[in-house]
Amino acid sequence: MYTVPQTSELFAEGSSPLEIAQQFEAYKAALSDAQFRSYQSAKSGASGFEFGKGIVTGSPDPVSQLREQMTNKSLSPDVVASMESALEQIESINKDFTLTNPLNSGTGPNPSTFGLVPYDLDPALAFLVPRAFILRNQIVRESGVGQAYEYRRITGLSNSGVGGVANLSTFFASTSANTTFKNVGLQRPGKIQYTADRHVVSAVEQGLSDAVDMQAQFAGTGYTDVRQLSHTALLYAHMLGEERNMLGARGTGSGYVGALGTPSVGTAASSTGGSLANSTTYYMKVTYSTAMGETVASAEFSQATAGGGTALIVTPNANIPAAALGVNVYIGAVSGTYTAKYSGTYTVTCTAVSVGTYTAPSSDASASALAYDGMLSVFTDPTQSGYVKRLNAALSTTEPGAELQAAFGSLFTSVLGDPESVLMSAAIRKELSAAVQQQGNPTGYRLNYNTGSDGMTIGALVTAIQNEYTGTMVDLVAHPYLPAGAALIWQKQLPFPDSGVSNTISARNTQDLMILEWPVIQMSYDISSYAYGSLLFKAPAWCGAITGIL
């Protein structure tokens, strides 16, 4: 039989009767408190007894606790009914936590949900900006002084065949020769002749700016340095702009080629394949495009569709300059009102007159007074370039590369040119590769296709073309910013070492690229890039251009 323990058994020996009595009373109070808390927990539903499990515990239900307390209070029926209604409302909002509760927000086409959950943010900010610096990485940069750069050149010499100087025989008879020196006739061999020129170009400014709000800088702390990102982005933006300028800028200042000029009226012919109204007169203007922009529009001309025609094929004047990299046609059904614009490399097909509004330019944008001349502008200028050809046709498929070989031959004949590189658009390079693959003469080209257990690898890429006049392999480089239909033939260094020209193109800068951090005068950090200089073409006669490749 269970026997109630004695106080001497419950508490340590040696205690005085008073200490034992005090400890016993504390023990009874703790036991009573534990029993009361267990009762209250079971009463509120926080704990209970389940068969096979024993005592189980759970989260107390506050609504159940309130209802339990209501039954133990002497409340009027009206008060009880009011409290029951309030408790029902509490139960209606007592939901579980989800991705949208208790926090949810987001509007727009891509709403965002901000629940009480973590999300994974990469520790580094991705900078997904493609960059190409083909020209900027190859053109030498030189230090200059002043606001303009001058260079002088010997462009012709007797027996050189260039510069307009006539050939001079070296044969002579010393006993009868009579050559004038300072108005005195002497027995000397004939005197040689020279031609020379003086070229002066003004320096131009280049620059961009950016700003970072202080709030944005501080808000990004711990994730990325926004000011550093601004510096990096500005640097790349300036360098990419310079790459494009080196390729296609066109200036109107001192020493530069100037605006392209107003095109003359084109011609149009009725065709099929569009949605124009048949037997209807349409009005058109034509502009040319450079890499900088459009020329002034031509005079208006008109053409009626006929013979079931539903389209108009517009051809610019036959004297379209090689520097015109594109042709634009403004067209409408009412004179002076143009509701559509079409663009192409040469002929342009107009298939519909939309409901848009287009204004044919009345001011020239093909060049800028703030710009220098880039490679496209100089290489397509017949007064400077060694070879200029506007093809207005597709590349030859019967003799792939024939157009480039014609250029190589002309440069070699005129100045003993031997180019190292040809810049072209990716589409032209693909067209040249396709011409080789479609070549019908199996003795001229042979393509080997790699086969294996996983199938066949096909394709052919033309990476270089052999100069049939000099034997040099000329690299073919696809430039992403080169306009459609254009190819540039580039000799980087002259084939004779004593020319005094180490590089045919150079970037002469009084101040090369620098980054300026402006004093803080408002709630932002402002920066700018700046450069002051020009692009010099000391030997463009060894280079050339082909445009109008369809």
Image (tube, helix red, strand yellow):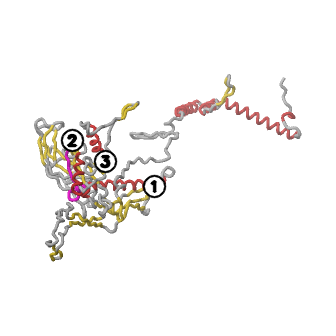
Secondary structure under badge 1? helix
Residue beneath label 1, please? 228
Q: Position of residue 378 (x, y in %)?
A: 25, 57
The circle drawn on residue 354 is: 2
Q: How many angstroms separate mark 2 from mark 1 (CA)? A: 47 Å
Q: Residues within 10 Å of mark 2 (few under 14, many from 20)?
A: some
Callout 3 amino acid: Leu
N-terminal label among 2 and 1 = 1
Callout 2 amino acid: Ser
Image quadrant in which you'd find residue 274: top left
Task: Give 514 or 125, whichever is nearer the viewer.
Answer: 514
In the displayed structure, 243 sits above or below 498; it is above
Instruction: Tell me the mark number nearer the camera, choosing from 2 and 1.
Output: 1
For the C terminus, the quadrant is top left
In the displayed structure, 479 sits above or below 10; it is below
The circle drawn on residue 212 is: none
Q: Is residue 228 magenta?
A: no
Q: Residues within 10 Å of mark 3 (few under 14, many from 20)?
A: many
The circle drawn on residue 476 is: 3
N-terminal label among 3 and 1 = 1
In the displayed structure, 252 sits above or below 95; it is below
Describe residue 195's horizontal placement relative to residue 117 as left or right.
left
Callout 1 amino acid: Gln
Describe residue 137's horizontal placement relative to residue 24 as left or right.
left
Residue 433 seen anywhere in this rendered image of the structure: yes
Q: How many angstroms separate mark 2 from mark 3 (CA)? A: 40 Å
* Residue range of the region highlighted in magenta in the rendering: 377-396
Q: Position of residue 214 (x, y in %)?
A: 46, 56
